[in-house]
Image (cartoon, grey):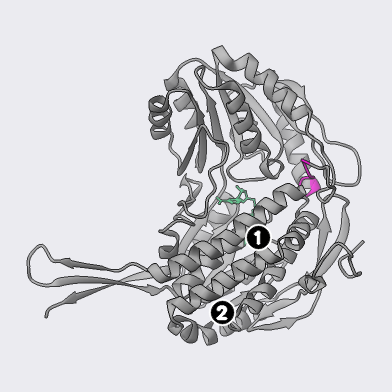
């Protein structure tokens, strides 16, 4: 069934509205098919924006900029708060839409909608607390006054794995700061972005403040926007490879960049950890979104004394999971986003097995029309296997054995990435010490989940630049302005 036919399972069929959203107008079109990864069926087509369309979006963002910047923070806050309310009211429809176009299991999709909406509530609260500074110059000669201006038009680029949350994590702080934006969602999952734009208009976001466009040519379309001197911000979430390309592109016009890139999270379990708690945490850290998360535990390092029990426990839990179409009520693990993703996961597992790893559950793609790979555990993985260095982005847990704390830290750091890490230990001093030793932006201690709109999310090393969320997230969309003042 496509989204063009009426669907009894959506309370609000208007949420299917789609078309380029520029200056408050919906411009219909087609050219980009959106596929349901659970069935390989085409759900809908969305327009394929050209460079000219993108420049129209920049014009619209420019036309709305002065008015939005001058809108009192309290009023900006109230619009964001209403948008939060509308997302919450439409949570079930949004979750179904996410599940249809991304494939994730409905419980994951519902969790994403709640998380995504929370960025609007959080930044509604932060919009009215934009900081400033007043200091005395050490010389005594003058005073130092620091104001924060909205940075200007922001281009926001988001991936397919969290179609709602990666967008709201950028739109929330940008609008709170007083910026107008152009959102380019991933072509795999554009329907959620268009649905949220419709709710934004209903919440009172003025025309041109949020523009949304889909394109099959992100390279030229985004380059053209970055080359326009009116665009002053690029906020990107996606792979490290594309992030590097965009940093080089942004260098030409010295556009401010925030980069949320790939991860390769280590999950460390020490002998003194509570085994059941570590297994519970491992299941969340690995299996939220079927492993298609930048924070997903990618390498499990388990101390020798607890290793075998952990392998047995994780194998049993992974083998018990129900794999199926995202929208099926019983499903716990949905499909991967594309066949290409399944092929990559299969290659990483096969290569590890060829080098001596042992599969304890799963280990090969599932037959059928959807893009399914089963929950998989592999142990005895050699440290130099490709799977230890690449982002798996799927439901595979490779387990490595370690002996000492120093060895665990060394192994955790043996990657160009530094987004997230997990540490399980009954000794909080040790867990904090190990966390300090890991080169990463975020550490979860005795927890399998760290994402929180109120906390600074982001990576060290090649996992990114800047932070989203928390009290500092709004500053990514502001330019500090210093006044040297005599009075
Ligand atoms: P991707 O880099 O392929 O695509 C991300 C976005 O960039 C998409 O909208 C895509 O259309 C666009 N894009 C691709 N090529 C482009 C180009 N040349 N110019 C401009 N835009 C371009 O990533 P993906 O496969 O969609 O997402 C998975 C990746 O995202 C993983 O590496 C994951 O770790 C990362 N991710 C990071 C975070 C984080 O917060 N650090 C969060 C989610 C996902």
Magenta portion: prevailing SS class: loop
Q: Quadrant of ligand 1?
A: bottom right
* Residue 257 image position (x, y, % from top left): 47, 62
User: Which residue is more in the foreground, 4 or 159?
Assistant: 4
Q: Position of residue 287 (x, y in %)?
A: 68, 38
Q: Is residue 2 visible?
A: yes
Left or right: 148, with 22 as reference point: left
Tag 1's secondary structure?
Answer: loop
Q: Choose between 113 and 393: the one closer to the eye.
A: 113
Q: Nearer the viewer, residue 354 or 316?
A: 316
Q: Which residues are magenta?
A: 332-339
Name the residue carrying label 2. 209
Horizontal side of 95 relative to 401 (left or right) equals: right
Q: Is residue 265 left or right of residue 221?
A: left
- Earlier sequence position, callout 1 versus callout 2: 1
Quadrant in which the C terminus appears: bottom left
Residue beneath the point at 52% across and 22% down: 273
User: Which disc, if any, is residue 164?
Assistant: 1
Q: Residues within 10 Å of mark 2 (few under 14, many from 20)?
A: many
């Amino acid at each position: 069934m496509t989204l063009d036919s009426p669907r009894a399972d959506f309370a609000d069929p208007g949420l299917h509205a789609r078309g380029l959203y520029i200056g408050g107008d919906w411009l219909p079109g087609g050219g980009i098919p959106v596929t349901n990864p659970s069935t390989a069926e085409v759900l809908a087509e969305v327009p394929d924006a050209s460079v000219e369309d993108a420049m129209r979006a920049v014009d619209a963002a420019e036309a709305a900029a002065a008015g939005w910047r001058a809108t009192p923070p309290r009023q900006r806050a109230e619009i964001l708060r209403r948008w939060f309310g509308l997302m919450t009211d439409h949570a079930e429809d949004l979750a179904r839409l996410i599940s249809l176009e991304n494939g994730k299991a409905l419980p994951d999709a519902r969790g994403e909608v709640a998380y995504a909406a929370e960025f609007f509530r959080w930044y509604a609260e932060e919009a009215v607390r934009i900081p400033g500074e007043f200091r005395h110059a050490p010389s005594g000669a003058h005073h130092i006054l620091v104001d924060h201006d909205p940075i200007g038009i922001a281009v926001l680029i988001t991936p397919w794995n969290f179609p709602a949350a990666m967008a709201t994590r950028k739109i929330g702080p940008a609008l709170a700061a007083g910026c107008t934006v152009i959102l380019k969602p991933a072509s795999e999952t554009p329907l959620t972005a268009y649905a949220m734009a419709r709710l934004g208009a209903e919440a009172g976001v003025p025309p041109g403040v949020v523009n949304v466009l889909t394109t099959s040519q992100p390279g030229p379309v985004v380059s053209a926007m970055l080359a326009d001197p009116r665009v002053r911000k690029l906020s990107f979430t996606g792979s490290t490879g594309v992030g590097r390309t965009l940093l080089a592109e942004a260098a030409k016009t010295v556009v401010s960049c925030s980069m949320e890139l790939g991860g390769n999270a280590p999950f460390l379990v020490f002998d003194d950890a509570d085994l059941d708690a570590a297994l519970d945490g491992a299941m969340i850290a690995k299996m939220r979104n079927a492993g298609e998360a930048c924070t997903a535990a990618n390498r499990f390092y388990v101390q020798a004394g607890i290793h075998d029990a952990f392998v047995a426990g994780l194998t049993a839990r992974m083998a018990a999971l129900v794999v199926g179409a995202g929208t099926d009520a019983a499903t716990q693990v949905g499909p991967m986003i594309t066949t290409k993703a399944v092929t990559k996961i299969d290659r990483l597992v096969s290569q590890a097995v060829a080098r001596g790893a042992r599969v304890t559950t799963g280990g090969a793609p599932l037959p059928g029309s959807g893009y399914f790979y089963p929950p998989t555990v592999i142990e005895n993985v050699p440290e130099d296997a490709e799977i230890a260095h690449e982002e798996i982005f799927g439901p595979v847990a490779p387990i490595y054995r370690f002996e000492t704390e120093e060895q665990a830290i060394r192994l955790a750091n043996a990657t160009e990435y530094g987004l997230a890490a997990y540490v399980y230990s009954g000794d909080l001093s040790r867990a904090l010490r190990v966390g300090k030793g890991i080169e990463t932006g975020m550490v979860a201690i005795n927890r399998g989940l760290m994402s929180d709109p109120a906390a600074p999310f982001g990576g060290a090393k090649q996992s990114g630049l800047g932070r989203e969320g928390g009290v500092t997230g709004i500053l990514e969309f502001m330019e500090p302005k210093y006044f040297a003042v005599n009075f």
